[in-house]
Image (spheres, rainbow, N blue to C red):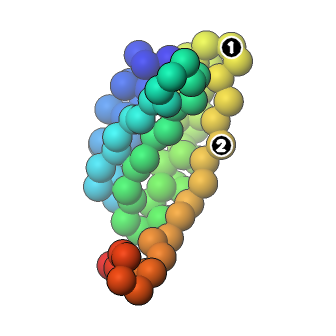
Amino acid sequence: MLKAWAEDATFFKQKPGLISTQLHRGIGGSTVFVNYAVWEPAAHMKQAVSDPAFRARLAHYPDGIVSRPHLFKKVAVPGICVEY
């Protein structure tokens, strides 16, 4: 999984709009990974994951891998965090 993800990260680095990406792994025996990627604008991310070259790459992941992409927006909470 890590090899396939690294290859995909390299692929995405060539695409417009990717600002950064970081893979996180759960601890304590967790099998959950979270890829936190920052794209600007979101439309560039949608274009990148719709690219047929990327879609073909999904076959490189081991059986049983489940991917659930989501788009998020920062939320301002007074006194805690700000929205950029």
Residue 50 position within the rendered picture, expressed as x and y whole percent measured from the top left: 58, 47
Q: Which is nearer the eye, 51 or 79? A: 79
53 to the left or right of 16? right
> SS for tag 1?
loop
Q: Which is nearer the eye, 18 or 27? A: 27
Which residue shows up at 45% across the image and 72% down it? 74
Q: CA distance from mark 2 to mark 1?
A: 15 Å
Q: Is residue 13 above or below residue 80?
A: above
Crowding at label 2, few (<14), some or many (≥20) Cα neighbours within 10 Å?
A: few
> Which residue of the protein is positioned furthest toward the bottom in this rendering?
78
Residue 11 visible in rendering: no
Amino acid type of the residue that numbered disc 1 sits on in the rendered structure: Asp
66 to the left or right of 24? right
Residue 76 position within the rendered picture, expressed as x and y whole percent measured from the top left: 43, 81
Amino acid type of the residue that numbered disc 2 sits on in the rendered structure: Arg
Residue 14 visible in rendering: yes
Q: Is residue 20 above or below residue 63?
A: below
Which residue shows up at 50% across the image and 38% down it? 34
Which residue shows up at 48% across the image and 49% down it? 48
Which residue shows up at 47% across the image and 26% down it? 27
Q: Which residue is mark 2?
A: 68
Q: Which residue is mark 1?
A: 63
